[in-house]
Amino acid sequence: MMNLILRAEWRRFVRQHTHVWVSGVFAALLCVSALWSGLAARELRLLNAQEMATWEQARTQARTQAREAAAKTGAAAPGATPRQ
C-alpha cells in the first residue's frame, strides 16, 4: 500500500516541471557549494603548511643560535642531553 502511494506521489512530482526545475537548481547549488568548500579547505591547508614551515625554521634557527652561544661560553646547550 505504501509503495503505491510513493509511486503516485513520485509521478505527480515529476510531472510538474516547476518541481523538477527547483530540484535541479537546488542540486546545482549544492554541487557548487561543495566545490567552493573544497577549494577553501585546500587554501587553508596550504596556509597551515606555510605557517608550520615558518615556525620550524624559526625553531631550528633558535636552536642553532643557542648551541653557538653555549659553545662560546663553554656551557651545555639548553635542552642538551649528556650524549650530545
Image (cartoon, grey):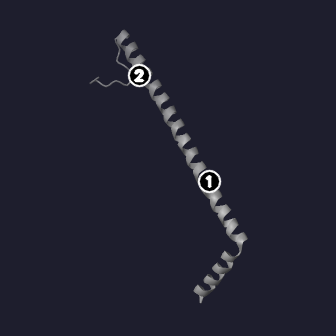
- Tell me the residue at 52%/41% (across/down): 45
Q: Which mark is residue 54?
A: none
Q: Residues within 10 Å of mark 2 (few under 14, many from 20)?
A: some
Task: Please tell me which of labels 1 and 2 falls first in the chain.
Answer: 1
- Tell me the residue at 66%/66% (across/down): 23
Q: Is residue 60 above or below residue 35?
A: above
- Tell me the residue at 62%/53% (across/down): 33
Which type of secondary structure does the marked residue at label 2 adopt? helix
| Kind of residue at disc 1 | Val
- Tell me the residue at 49%/28% (across/down): 54
Which type of secondary structure does the marked residue at label 1 adopt? helix
Look at mark 1 in the image and give the residue it sits on: 32
Look at mark 2 in the image and give the residue it sits on: 63
Image location (x, y in percent) of residue 22: 70, 66
Q: Residues within 10 Å of mark 1 (few under 14, many from 20)?
A: few
Residue lying furthest right: 18
Q: How many marks?
A: 2
Image location (x, y in percent) of residue 8: 64, 84
Residue lying furthest bottom: 1
Image location (x, y in percent) of residue 13: 68, 76
Image location (x, y in percent) of residue 21: 69, 66
Residue lying furthest top: 72
